[in-house]
Amino acid sequence: MNARVAIRGDLLDFTAEPPWGETESTAVRFRPDHWLLADAGRIVAVQADAPGEGWQRVDQSGRLILPGFIDTHVHSPQLDVIASYGTELLDWLNTYTFPAERRYADAAEAEAGAARFLDALLAHGTSAAVVFPTVHKVSCDSLFAAAQQRGMRLVAGKVLMDRHAPDGLRDDVDQAERDCRELIARWHGRDRLAYAVTVRFAPTSTPEQLAMAGRLCAEDPSLYMQTHVAENRDEVRWVHELFPEARSYLDVYARAGLLHARSVLAHGIWLDDADRAALRESGAQIAHSPSSNLFLGSGLFDWRAAEAAGAAVSLASDVGGGTSLSMLRTIADAYKIQAMAGQRLTAWKALHAATRGAARALGLDHEIGSFEAGRCADLCVWDWAAGPVAERRLEVARGLHEKVFAWLTLGDERNLRRTWVNGVERYRRDD
Ligand SMILES: [Zn+2]
């Protein structure tokens, strides 16, 4: 295989954060019918002219090429419970999710599940993700091994939960600490993998376990931290009962040393101004999960308030609470949530959050999220339209924003043609 690949198509990425509400933005970089050149997995140039001899040419002209999407919050074992009927968060966990996660104690199940999950991400145009496996160490090992085989950027960690979870899904502080340390030594910083101290959510960890998680973060600031915060009103009430000393749900994590620049907090629907200020000051990000928030009836995230407070916001599928791994479907739901608040989410704001914005919030923008030279060649090729309705809509669309917004709103994984990870084709669909 030739290490020097040149891919031709309509290249779209971002050079800055697009301002709220602007459909014309200088932050957007659209280079129609250009060639992207990658050598040994790295982007070396984008140019209008075809490259010379020595390049393997892949002509995708007439198709849209974007940086691979970054899904900042998703659960690998929950493909088994996606689209489960009739519950809100706490019932949903007990009825569907916990029983499904128990299967991942088994090494063969965990291995097969990790492969199935990562191949599904790649088949939806997502090349990097921040992932929850299960409480079982083997589920985390399997996930990292499968991501390494595929050359993917992955942030993950063994889930911590030592209370309020059924048998077979609880750890304890000492065993959990040993497992974390082993996994960190084995995987953190290896190839494109990073470890996240992974607290499921405040109710399923004792204060002692939260303190242990905080110690791990303090010992090594290069570790990520991932958890859930303020998703559902019953959950928020429960956290207030369990942690009466904390000012707010987010404050439970802050007091345990879990709120820092590498923290990824899913949801953040029921936050106040002091919480948003704490997010800004810490540099932590909210992984906004619109599909999940609608499906579980959790609430409507106030993206504009987070932005106004200076808090970073990325986008996440949160499968299995979310109903699709597609970041296009996720963005379409995000648009509708903002519309309910009288706000307009532009295609630029949304796409930026799912690519360059997420990369920056994770401190990984030197590696992913754009087509700057030196970045890894993680990219996806998309059909502008799939099916007669989208074809007609694209035909009459005027201007770039109208065209891209229609693509986002009408499209999904059926538009995807190719996914490259680190310069290697990992997904392909031909008619
Ligand atoms: Zn989640």
Image (cartoon, grey):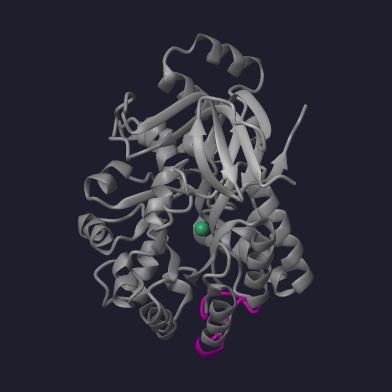
Instruction: Give x and y (percent) for residue 46.
Output: 50, 34
Q: Look at the image and tell me whether residue 83 can be seen.
A: no
Q: Nearer the viewer, residue 151 or 91?
A: 151
Q: Is residue 258 left or right of residue 91?
A: left
Q: Residue at x 33, y 68 (%)?
A: 259
Question: Which span of residues is magenta-colored?
Answer: 162-175
Vertical position of residue 155 compared to residue 370: above or below = below
Q: Nearer the viewer, residue 164 or 315?
A: 315
Q: Residue at x 44, y 37 (%)?
A: 351
Quarter of the rendering containing residue 255: bottom left
Q: Residue at x 59, y 74 (%)?
A: 135
Instruction: Give x and y (percent) for residue 54.
Output: 67, 38
Residue farthest to the bottom? 174
Q: Magenta stretch: dominant SS?
A: loop
How many marks on residues? 0
Instruction: Give x and y (percent) for residue 145.
Output: 67, 67
Q: Is residue 302 left or right of residue 135?
A: left
Q: Look at the image and tell me whether residue 28 can be seen.
A: yes
Q: Is residue 36 left or right of residue 119?
A: left
Residue farthest to the front? 53
**170 inside magenta stretch:** yes
Q: Residue at x 51, y 62 (%)?
A: 90
Vertical position of residue 211 compared to residue 416: above or below = below
Q: Nearer the viewer, residue 426 or 98?
A: 426
**80 inside magenta stretch:** no
Q: Is residue 115 left or right of residue 208?
A: right
